Each structure stands twice: as structure tokens, then as C-alpha cells.
Amino acid sequence: MSPLPSIVPFLQVIQDSEFSTAFRESAYVWGIVDGVHVIGLCVFLGMLLFWELRLFNVGVRSASVSETWARLSPWIMVGFVLMTVSGVVLFCGEYNLVIQVVFEYFVHRKGL
């Protein structure tokens, strides 16, 4: 048995909160936040792809690597922030049994 306490009661408190309940019962908020999450993911990964292509000298060759990074890094950060904030909101809105099982397995069985 792992000396770490179970994380399931904490997750249950999050799920039972007023915010989580209002979020789940709203007709449009879930879709809007999910859409923002997907847009953030696309912006983050798309700009990161352009950056990687430039590093491999496949992308835009007319700009230097530092110039390309200066142009793309703000967009990468915007995508990351959108993706992270909306992901936390989605997680707090509804965690499910799969997440609970994964946490229990890795925290208690593997001792992480």
C-alpha cells in the first residue's frame, strides 16, 4: 500500500462544487469552452509545427531561426494558455471514472 493518500476525495469535492454543477448543467458553456480548448490546441500545435519545420530547414527559409521564433513564440504562448486554462475548466467541470482509475493506478499502485 502506498503512503500517499487517495486523490479520489479531492476529485469528488471538485465534481460536487457549485461551479462544476453549473458548468455541467449549462446548455452552451460546455460547447464554448470545448471549442476554445480545441482552438488553443490547434494554435499551439500549428505554430509549433511551423517552428519545427524552420528548425529542420524545411519551412520559411527567408527568415532566420531567431526571427521565426520571435514571430511565432507569442502565438505559441497564446495557444498554450488557451489550451491549459480551458483544459482545467473542462477537468473541473466533469472528471469521470477513467480519470479516477488512472490516478488510482499510478498514484497507489506505482507509488508516484
Image: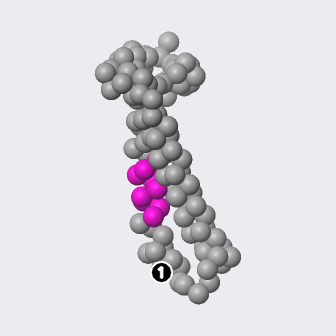
- Residue 86's spot in the image, x, y percent? 43, 42
- Residue 25's spot in the image, x, y percent? 42, 23
Q: Is residue 98 left or right of residue 8?
A: right
Q: Give the range drawn in magenta.
A: 75-83
Q: Is residue 56 left or right of residue 7?
A: right
Q: Name the residue under label 1.
A: 67
Q: Main secondary structure of the magenta part?
A: helix
| Residue drawn at (52%, 57%) of the image | 44
- Residue 10's spot in the image, x, y percent? 37, 19
Q: Does the magenta stretch include residue 42?
A: no
Q: Does the rendering let one see residue 109?
A: no
User: In the picture, residue 89 is in which quadrant?
Assistant: top left
Closest to the observer: 103 or 40? 40
- Residue 62's spot in the image, x, y percent? 59, 87
| Residue drawn at (56%, 69%) of the image | 51
| Residue drawn at (50%, 12%) of the image | 1
Q: Secondary structure beneath disc 1?
A: helix
Residue lying furthest right? 58
| Residue drawn at (45%, 53%) of the image | 80
Q: Does the rendering let one see residue 7?
A: yes
